[in-house]
C-alpha cells in the first residue's frame, strides 16, 4: 500500500496516467466518429424489408414467407429501373396501399384473417449476412410488415439494391446487385461489408457493431 501511495505521488507517474487517459478518450472519440460516419453512409445506401410473422408456429412462419415472396415480386416489378435508394423509397411510398393489399390478399388466400400493418421508417436491424455480403447492425430505412400480433420470428432483406432473393440458402448475391451496391457506396464502405478475409476491415466492422449494439448509435429523427 505504501508503495502505491508513493507511486501516485510521483509526478512522472501522474503524467503518464493523465496522458494514457487522454489517449484513451481520444481513441474512443475517433472510433465513435468513424462508426457513426460509416453507419450513416451504409444506412443511406440501402432500403430494407422487414417482415414479422404473427407467431412462431409453422403455419404462421410459412405464411410469412408467402407474404414476403409476393411483396418482393411486386417490388421487383415496380423498381426494375431504380437507380437510387431515394427513388426506391418514393416508389414504395407511392404504392404503399398496393403493398398493403397484396399482403392482405396473400393472408386471405391462405385461409387466415390476420390484420397487416405496413409502415415505412427508420428501424433497428441486427447484423445480417446476404450470401457474401454482410450488413452491420444499425438503423436502416425500411418497409416493415407486421402480420397479426407480430410476435413471431423476423425476416430481413434488402429491397434496394435488390438483395432479396427467394432462395436465401443459395449464398450468392447477383453480380448486378453488387454493382449497384458499389455505385451507391464509397469504396471503403463496400470493402467493409464484402471482404471477410481482411483482418483490418473485420476489426472496423466489429467497432461499428460495438457502438451500435451498445446503443450509442441511434435511429434517425
Image: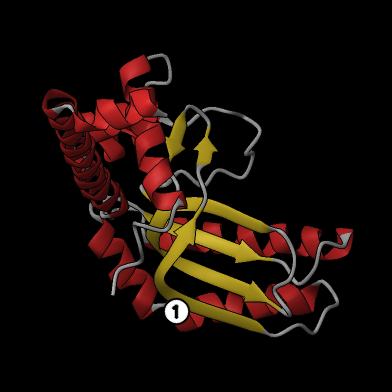
Q: x%, y% of residue 102?
A: 60, 75
Instruction: Give the number of marks.
Output: 1
Q: Give residue 113's quadrant in the image.
A: bottom right
Q: Residue at x 17, y 32 (%)?
A: 14
Quarter of the picture containing the N terminus is top left
Q: Residue at x 61, y 45 (%)?
A: 166
From the top left corner, tell me how far across and down residue 99 is, in percent.
52, 75
* 37 to the left or right of 94: left
193 or 101: nearer the viewer: 193
Tag 1 residue: 96
Can residue 64 be seen here? The reply is yes
Quarter of the image for the C terminus: give it: bottom left
59 to 203, vertically: above or below: below
For the question of whether residue 159 can be seen, the reply is no
Whole-percent x, y for residue 66 in the image: 71, 60
Q: Residue at x 44, y 32 (%)?
A: 133
Which residue corresponds to the image point at 53% horizontal and 30% vertical from the top-left? 131
In the displayed structure image, the side of residue 25 where residue 202 appears, left or right: right
Amino acid at each position: 500500500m505504501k508503495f502505491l501511495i508513493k507511486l501516485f505521488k510521483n509526478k512522472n507517474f501522474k503524467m503518464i496516467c493523465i496522458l494514457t487517459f487522454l489517449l484513451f478518450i481520444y481513441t474512443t472519440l475517433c472510433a465513435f466518429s468513424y462508426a457513426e460516419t460509416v453507419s450513416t453512409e451504409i444506412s443511406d445506401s440501402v432500403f430494407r424489408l422487414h417482415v414479422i410473422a404473427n407467431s412462431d408456429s409453422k403455419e404462421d412462419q410459412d405464411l410469412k414467407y408467402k407474404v414476403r415472396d409476393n411483396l418482393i415480386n411486386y417490388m421487383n416489378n415496380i423498381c426494375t429501373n431504380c437507380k437510387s435508394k431515394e427513388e426506391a423509397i418514393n416508389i414504395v411510398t407511392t404504392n404503399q396501399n398496393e403493398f398493403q393489399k397484396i399482403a392482405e390478399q396473400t393472408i386471405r388466400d391462405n385461409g387466415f384473417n390476420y390484420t397487416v400493418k405496413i409502415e415505412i421508417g427508420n428501424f433497428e436491424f441486427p447484423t445480417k449476412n446476404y450470401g457474401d455480403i454482410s450488413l452491420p447492425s444499425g438503423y436502416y430505412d425500411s418497409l416493415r410488415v407486421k402480420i397479426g400480433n407480430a410476435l413471431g420470428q423476423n425476416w430481413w432483406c434488402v429491397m434496394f439494391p435488390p438483395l432479396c432473393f427467394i432462395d436465401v440458402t443459395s449464398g450468392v448475391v447477383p453480380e448486378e446487385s453488387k454493382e449497384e451496391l458499389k455505385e451507391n457506396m464509397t469504396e471503403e464502405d463496400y470493402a467493409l461489408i464484402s471482404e471477410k478475409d481482411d483482418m483490418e476491415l473485420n476489426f472496423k466492422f466489429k467497432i461499428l457493431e460495438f457502438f451500435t449494439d451498445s446503443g450509442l448509435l441511434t435511429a434517425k429523427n
